[in-house]
Amino acid sequence: MQNNPDTTLITADAPVAANTHGGRAKCLQRLVRLDLPVPRTVALSFDAVHEIVEGRMPDLAAILGQFDPTSLLCVRPSSEDPDWGGPGAVLNIGMNDARYVDLSDAMGVEAAAALYLRFVQSYAIHVARLDPDVFDDVEADGREGLKQSLRAYEDETDESFPQDPGEQLSAVLRSMARAWEGTSARLLRQAKGAPADAGLGLVVQEMIPGLGQGECGSGVLQLVDPATGRPQITGRYLSQSQGRDALGEDVAALYLEKDTRGPSLEDVAPEAFVAIKDHAALMREKLREEMQVEFVIENGRVHILDGVRVPRSARAGVRIAVRLAEDGIIPPQEAVMRVDPHSLNELLHRQVHPKTERDVLTTGIAASPGAASGRIVFTAAEAQASAARGEPCILVRRETSPEDVRGMHAAVAVLTEKGGMTSHAAVIGRGLGLPCIVGASEMRFQTKKKLLTAPDGRIFKTGDILTIDGSSGQVLAGEPEMLEAALDDCFQTLMGWADAERDIGIRANADTPADAQTARNFDAQGIGLCRTEHMFFDPGRLIVMREMIFAQTSKGRAAVLERLLPMQREDFVQLFRIMKGQPVCIRLFDPPLHEFLPTTRTGQRELAEALDLPVSDVERRVDAMSEYNPMLGLRGVRLGVTVPEIYDMQARAIFEATLEASKEGAPVVPEIMIPLVSAKREVELVKARIDSVAASVASEGGQEFDYRLGVMVETPRACLRADEIAPHTAFLSFGTNDLTQMAYGLSRDDAGRFMSAYVRQGVFIEDPFHVLDVDGVGELLQLGAERGRRAQPEVTLSVCGEHGGNPESIAFCRDAGFDYVSCSPFRVPVARLAAAQLAISSKLGG
């Protein structure tokens, strides 16, 4: 058999590889090479297993010939990647009437009967594929239960339970091979990242009976806590010697280390305990991984059945990778490569404890990660009042608008009926690090009645407690146990290693001083997008904005905006001071003005009173400013051209803040970004006014300063005409949220209603608002970048849409030669790690 690579005894020099025999087989060979006490094992290759599916069985006599005729065997799956899973293991193959008699003498009749009974039922259900209810009438244990189970098997199959070990093994191999090839198994492993045609190996291993006068038992041990990654011996051990019934239900569970709560493996078998620890430490060093050791103790002697990678949480994964590198077992670059960037969300935010019970009401779109519990409120004002009382609250809206931003700041989480990954609630939620679920359309939102109805009929009103799990998209009833965020020393060490490797800049989208401080805390390299419109929804500023909208002349608008100037200036001074000389890119006013006007009759009456105007005047103004499609209407640069006083005021505030902040340190060089540009002339008009304001501020302050003017490229035409636009700018920052909307003709706020159906039916590979569409939108980016650089070689290129924090999208931006990406503050660590992994892979030629 040694000459047959498809069916081989695992020895130190056997032809076994992970890509031909699977990860488990290869790991067992490594354990054999470490001279660990591994039972005899035969590995079947992917090809051999496929042959079994085709009806061609390997030489069973040769396989069985590798083992003692009295041994019981087990068969385990061996996929190329352990995470891909496989059929469940089948134990005690070879158990039959004759073996039952032998074992009855060695271990007692009842124990032998219990062993045989479990094998009969397992074989019947998992190999012969009988329905489990075949054994519903088996109520006895031991010998009587065995008799009833054998009779039930015979009644169901019209044949006796197979006695030949070869026949049993053949059926087990055939069953496991066919299970792997089944449709359900294929879809399941594809969901875990496996190719559809991934192969399966099988390992046939001798079982250790664990009989004798000394300590006998089985268990698993690892040297770290799987939840935290901290050094701690954990696992489980079941002692047959300490239990009343050697193999029955009363087997004693012992602690691994000395413990005041009861006996431990260290107490009953100290030499075996030390040996297992030593084996685990050797495996850690030589296999370069924290390993979980599966073992059996027979008469005090240790046997190692298997070694698998320790299952771990995201926070444990970071600590394990860092400790392996610090101990010199792996290089820091490999530690960086071992951590999934997406998994960092678990460290950055509170999470629902994985072991807690979940009362799931519905599942929406997981728009912003993290979890929070609180009393539900239905308006931004209620959220602010709740926060003032110190009560955590969840803001429930059909959809959010800029008017809700202050309420979102006050809430601990947000839930909306409408929206997708780049809707208002999703973008602001990610920016604030606020757990958020959007598109929860299966729930009924009655915001006027302040009621929320779950699909199962349960009704929730103001003050009831819900939990928002923005990582999974689940809305939960009640207040489950939470895990706190964990940005510890290991996280900081890993991110330091990542920054040393990456070759693309990472900035943050930050609108407020709090956002900017979060960006600094996460080591962002500046602010890539500051959306100034959110600064105007403070109640004190909102009324001024409304006065400006009702002003009849340019001079009147400028006079009203003079009152906003000091407020805006102070906003920018704070941002510049927090960022301490790092670049701050400020987008000029973008939304349509109608968003600042009340939509309800009550709100319009209150505005009329505040402005001392007839209600009819307010109603006429609101009607006059309404648009059929406001997101494609009078907004962005179009406002800057037609209502230039707004941009004039903002430019003055930026430049005066520049002079003020520069007094305390290095000179500030602000970046000013014009939104929604589609034509060169728009840039020329706005640039002329901004240059004029800059000259005036410099003259008034008696001090020169530098600034950079750029364009937010978010229309397809701006991409196509980038060669005309770029010569007038220092940078082109691609706003992929709106660019995706316009390229697809999709509303990002409404796409959530049908996006899951589109992805499920293969229309889109992924939600294009979540993962950058590299084929369509990506081509626009490439065209814009190439044409812009051709006309202006020094132009800085970046992406400032939410795609900037997506690892897959960062890969595209890096390959396309972009200088930096910008994303929500809480996605900055994800982007830093993803960018580092791309750089390392590039150096390795991957």
Image (cartoon, rainbow, N blue to C red):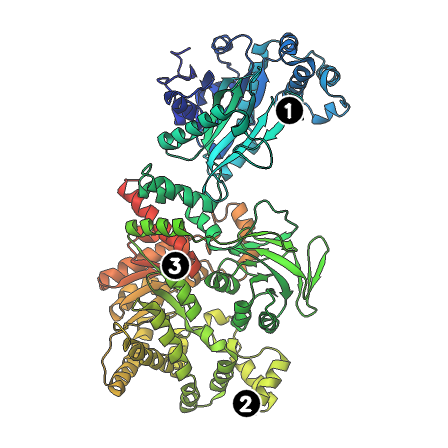
Q: Is residue 136 left or right of residue 15?
A: right
Q: Position of residue 304 (x, y in %)?
A: 47, 23
498 or 800: which is nearer to us?
Answer: 498
In terms of image quadrants, where is residue 800? bottom left
The first of marks 2 and 3 along the sequence is 3
Q: Earlier in the sequence, mark 1 or mark 3?
A: 1
Query: Looking at the image, is 98 positioned above or below residue 539?
Result: above
**In this picture, residue 729 sits left or right of residue 419:** left
Q: Do the numbered discs 2 and 3 sit on residues whose CB atoms are within 8 Å?
A: no
Q: Does residue 165 appear anywhere in the picture? A: yes
Relative horizontal placement of residue 126, taking residue 302 as reference (left or right) = right
Alpha carbons under labels 2 and 3: distance apart: 44 Å
Question: Residue at (46%, 15%) from the top-left corner?
Answer: 40
| Quadrant including the C terminus | top left
- The disc placed on residue 522 is 3
The residue wearing badge 2 is 611
Three-letter amino acid code at the position of disc 2: Leu
Q: Amino acid at mark 3?
A: Phe
Instruction: Identify the residue position indicated by label 1 in the image.
Output: 243
Q: Nearer the viewer, residue 845 or 54?
A: 845
Q: Is residue 196 visible?
A: no
Task: Tell me what residue is drawn at x 37 percent, y 63 percent.
Answer: 520
Look at label 1 and name its amino acid: Gly
Q: Quadrant of the N terminus?
A: top left
In the image, residue 403 lies at what x, y percent?
54, 73
Q: In front: 277, or 842?
A: 277
Left or right of 195 in this view: 694: left
Classify mark 2: residues with Cα within 10 Å, few (<14), some (14-19) or many (20+): some
Tell me where residue 727 appears, x and y as whole percent. Answer: 24, 68
